[in-house]
Image: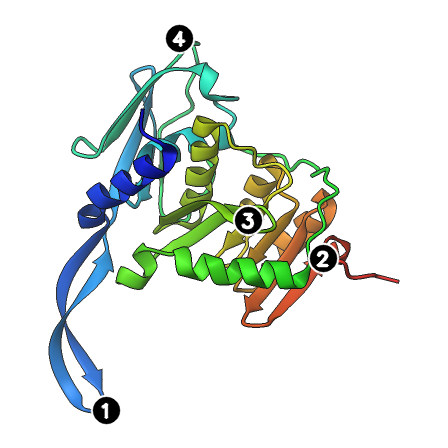
Amino acid sequence: MMERQDIQKKIGELDMQDVAAEVVCNYFSDEGWSRTSVYVPSEMELTIYINQKALVTILCTAAKLNYLVLGYLYAEGIISGVGDVASIRVSEEESLADVRLNNSGYELPALKRLGCSGSSVFKTQGQKVESDLVVTPLEVLSLMKQFQEQMVLYPHSGGVHTSALSDTRNLLVVAEDIGRHNTLNKIQGECLLYGISTRDRLLLITGRISSEMLLKAAKMQVPVVVSRHAPTKNAILLARDMGIALVGKARGDRLAVFTHPERLGCSTD
């Protein structure tokens, strides 16, 4: 049986030609114009079928698609774990994921099409994150440096988002996609499949932290969410209510904590 690391390596080797494409562009610099080849991210539409009925079409990057499907179904409350799935077949060639649930009578909502924003088709209620996790700013900044080094597709082509789940020392799962929300769904799906706990972990994100991203983090019971960019106002309000430390502008040797600074050892007295 292949180890998880071997499976991930194999996935990366097989999918690189499908996740980035070489194109020619006209490039301008201080030396003037030139024609050159560059890599850009590829994208695909993936339609998820539940019990042979279309549920949703997602615009995504063609990597870790099985994790994306499982994570999406879990995030939307369609499954509570892999035990609810009788079978799953993902075909990049057919642009579909055929999922059969143990509940053959599951009623589907109307078909939706999601762009790379990954906006939810269902209403999701935020839940309080209960955790005693405390990390130091230096631990967070060290993880962000590891995070930068673990990116594969972004240095190759740019134009994608990356997210990672970590403990206070190491990155546990890394996912890249044209959609921010898709990266979290891929992380959630991989954790479900391999029995990796998301509770009491950190989420590291390259893009801005929106309220929808916070809702996904809360469902994962992640008490600390970190980004290189600033969060939205609604994300700050949600994080405050749900007990999540929201860390933004984490670059170099600096970061900003917008909510629950006590989780990073900062006294509010």
Distance of label 4 from label 3 (alpha carbons): 34 Å
Res 251 label: none
Res 30 label: 1
Labels 4 and 3 touching (C-beta < 8 A) = no
Q: Is residue 62 visible?
A: no
Q: Position of residue 87 (x, y in %)?
A: 33, 16
Q: Earlier in the sequence, mark 1 or mark 2?
A: 1
Q: Earlier in the sequence, mark 4 or mark 3?
A: 4
Residue that badge 4 annotates = 104
Q: Is residue 263 left or right of residue 212?
A: right
Q: Earlier in the sequence, mark 3 or mark 2?
A: 3
Distance of label 2 from label 4 (alpha carbons): 46 Å
Q: Residue at x 46, y 50 (%)?
A: 163
Between disc 3 and disc 1, the foreground one is 3
- Which residue, as the protein is rendered here, is positioned at the far right? 269
Res 264 label: 2
Q: Earlier in the sequence, mark 3 or mark 1?
A: 1
Q: Is residue 7 left or right of residue 165?
A: left
Callout 4: SS? loop
Q: Residue at x 30, y 55 (%)?
A: 153
Distance of label 1 from label 2 (alpha carbons): 44 Å
Q: Position of residue 228 (x, y in %)?
A: 52, 64
Distance of label 1 from label 4 (alpha carbons): 63 Å
Q: Quadrant of residue 40?
A: bottom left
Res 203 label: 3
Callout 3: SS? strand
Callout 1: SS? loop
Between disc 1 and disc 4, the foreground one is 1
Q: Quadrant of residue 68?
A: top left
* Pointer 1 local density, CA inside 10 Å: few below 14, some 14–19, many at least 20: few
Q: Is residue 211 left or right of residue 95?
A: right
Q: Position of residue 126 (x, y in %)?
A: 64, 38
